[in-house]
Amino acid sequence: MMKNVFSISPLAHASKAIAFAALLMLAVAPVAAHAEEKKPTAAAVAATKTPLDHLGRIAVVDTQFLVSNSTAGKSIRSQLEKQRATYKTQIEKQEAELRAGEKKLIEQQKTMTKEQFMAERKKFQEKVIAAQKSVQQRRIAFDKAYNTAMSKLREHIVKIVADHAGKEGISLVLARQDLVLVDARMDMTQDILKALNAKVSSIPVSIN
């Protein structure tokens, strides 16, 4: 009977699962020997072992928890939020300038010929389109920078999990988000978090 068992809710946007793929095979239990039969030899006992005996231990890691709570993960979000705040200020200034330009154009319409007004309106529309394009490009740049930084963080996680698994004799590591039921003793998330924080504290977020 499993101890310390808890349910895990699947996450809609979870990072890719860390998994060292392996097939868990079930072997047919050996047929019970009659009481009067001789004690089985060591070779016979070895032959009855299931493949799982040779696979080693199985562990679970909550990758989403590591991304959200690691020092490096927090640094990525902090950098991104600061740059977003700076860019938001720039956008608000640009919007204010466009509103002022629109108001001025409307006021000057009374003193302009139709041709002059059409020309000035075209220039204003081009400024609006350029501003919209700039916002879209900046949004794409933010997404790209975030995804690049997170990809580097996940690379660190995978390497640390692999090193830890090798040292502890663990043959299979599953993502906790993909499991409905798991024994708490199999969870090595806190060990990985400690090792991750010790190895990397910040990952640069470069927005071009």
Image: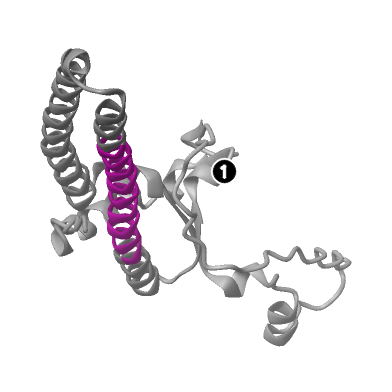
90 relative to 75, above or below:
above
Where residue 141 appears, as percent x and y from the top left, is 29, 52
Specify whether 40 is left or right of 11: right
Which element carries disc 1, helix, strand or loop? Answer: loop
Magenta-drawn stretch, dominant element (helix, strand or loop): helix
* Of residues 51 and 42, the one drawn nearer to the viewer in this rendering: 51
Q: Residue at x 60, y 39 (%)?
A: 1
Q: Residues within 10 Å of mark 1 (few under 14, many from 20)?
A: few
Residue 160 lies in quadrant: bottom left
* Of residues 114 and 34, the one drawn nearer to the viewer in this rendering: 114
Q: Residue furthest bottom?
A: 43
* Of residues 137 and 14, the one drawn nearer to the viewer in this rendering: 137
Q: Residue at x 73, y 66 (%)?
A: 25
58 relative to 94, above or below:
below
Q: Residue under label 1, please give it.
A: 179
Residue numbers of the magenta segment:
126-155
Where residue 115 appears, as percent x and y from the top left, is 30, 30
Specify whether 29 is left or right of 3: right
* Of residues 152 and 30, the one drawn nearer to the viewer in this rendering: 152
Where residue 150 appears, as percent x and y from the top left, is 32, 55
The type of residue carrying mark 1 is Leu
**The stretch drawn in magenta includes residue 142:** yes
**The stretch drawn in magenta includes residue 53:** no
Q: Residue at x 24, y 32 (%)?
A: 120
Where residue 62 appears, as percent x and y from the top left, is 41, 47
27 relative to 67, above or below:
below
